[in-house]
Amino acid sequence: MQASLSLSLSLPPAAPRSDPAPTVFRPSALRFCGLRREALGLRPLRPAGSTWVFPSPARTPSRKTVAAVSGNGSPSKGFDYDLVIIGAGVGGHGAALHAVEKGLKTAIIEGDIVGGTCVNRGCVPSKALLAVSGRMRELQNEHHLKALGLQVSSPGYDRQGVADHANNLASKIRNNLTNSLKALGVDILTGVGTIAGTQKVKYGKVGFPDTEITAKDIIIATGSVPFVPNGIEVDGKTVFTSDHALKLEWVPEWIAIVGSGYIGLEFSDVYSALGSEVTFVEALDQLMPGFDPEIGKLAQRVLINPRKIDYHTGVFAKKITPAKDGKPVLIELIDAKTKEPKDTLEVDAALIATGRAPFTKGLGLENINIVTQRGFVPVNERMQVIDASGNLIPHLYCIGDANGKMMLAHAASAQGISVVEQIGGRDNVLNHLSIPAACFTHPEISMVGMTEPQAREKAQQEGFEVSVAKTSFKANTKALAENEGEGLAKLIYRPDTGEILGVHILGMHAADLIHEASNAIALGTRVQDIKFAVHAHPTLSEVLDELFKSAKVFECISGVHSMRNCA
């Protein structure tokens, strides 16, 4: 789930119309969002007349890899760097690349490996596993294949081959990210980074002397780790987190998944496709509590009920004991409200998917009077860090999972880019309601903006009306051609202004379709304007085309307000 978003839009003045010169297509001029061209293994852009320099890193406990582009920025007077970023995940990487573009001398500190959670233990390897589960579902669905006129003998899989696919993908993306940082002149400082004081950072390996450097601005981008509730004993073999699950060391016959959010739902897709029976354990009264309720109900009907998946809702896993001495994994369930014992499950394995916790311990925040809130670093809407007295700390920012505003890799990248814009003197406030999210199940789920209950609560507080429009994938030619008509798109909007408040999609390639809606929210495009956008036929994008056209807004005709179909 990587994306680099910049919500400031400045367009040059329109040139006078004249006979246009032939358009020359230059691949080198392409700009890629998210992990960008370098992360995809494409040759990075090089300023004219510059040369690449790749010195060999010194073999010291604290390693500094310098790969500067000639003339690519020099630090502000009195500082070693213009910008130092602690953490080389997707957020830190996006900020570093944007800083180099702006001519800032930049360093990034990483104590583990480049890429952070997303590339190494999250988004990237999980998508490799989900690609396999998607193929397996297609091959296992005899009814679907027969409808397409296909015949396939009994499908199977090689577990180690599947695991290798996930590991190889993570390794490839990690290497591409590392190479892109080096090629663009970012100094990679190896070690654990801590805040030493105002505009000062220390880094080094445990047991060795630290190196102190100065920077005009500092960004904290240390990410998060899996959250494991009290009472759960993780052994990494039979009771494990997503970090362990992505290695796919075995496929249990029966696995309990504690938590039914994005992580739990995606792993239920993987394990059930590979032959496991799955049991969800959810503390709230319904599965998928973070989703729009209507989408959640449909998702349960499509993704849960037809599969070998059952569930317990309204219960806590008070204690989980790993399997040992021939005994299974034991899960003691209690009522979430009364705390009374409810049941005991005996399963082969348990995946703990109860969310993530910020990785902010050991950062030296106490050195500058910062008190975290449940581990999160407090920030304002510009990602500026706030101290214990409520004052902004100059030149210090925090992005991504560490600040808790929106725990998504592409949100971290967008926040990092926004911070670099501010450092360069261009005010930039990121609209988090325009940042999409997706769950890569089969079919996929995606969303942007508010859920319907959230929108109605806001409407009640501020005194406006909310309308809802829906369209089905069953009316889409491309979906029917693929025999994938199961799906729904839902638009939540203001009928008085046409403002888009939220869009939710369940269906084939929902994760790709959501971006038209997220961009519309980011740019302030109204329903009555976006309905004029042209979509190729037959494509899945027409699901959104029909959705926007079906919305109704108030229009003033000869001084009389009336409700008219937006189309």
Image (cartoon, rainbow, N blue to C red):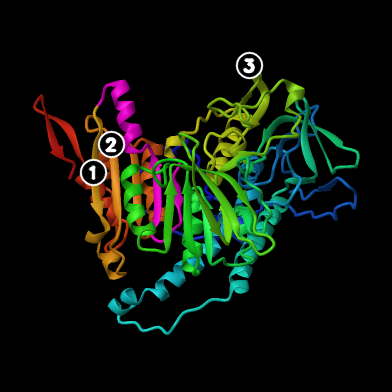
320 left or right of 275 in image: right
Residue located 26% across and 67% down the image: 480
Q: For residue 418, which quarter of the picture?
A: top right
Q: Residues within 10 Å of mark 2 (few under 14, many from 20)?
A: many
Q: Residues within 10 Å of mark 1 (few under 14, many from 20)?
A: some
Q: Which amino acid does label 1 sit on?
A: Ala
- Magenta segment: does it hold 453? yes
Instruction: Give the secondary structure at mark 3.
Output: loop
Magenta extent: 435-464
Q: Residue 493 carries which label?
A: 2
Is mark 2 in CB contact (under 8 Å) with mark 1? yes
Which of the two labelled residues, at mark 3 and mark 1, occupies the earlier sequence position?
3
Q: Which of 249 and 341 is in front in this view?
A: 341
- Magenta segment: does it hold 425? no
Distance of label 2 from label 1 (alpha carbons): 8 Å
Q: What residue type is labelled 2?
A: Tyr
Q: Nearer the viewer, residue 68 or 239?
A: 239
Is mark 3 in CB contact (under 8 Å) with mark 1? no
Q: Name the residue under label 1.
A: 469
Q: Which mark is residue 391?
A: 3
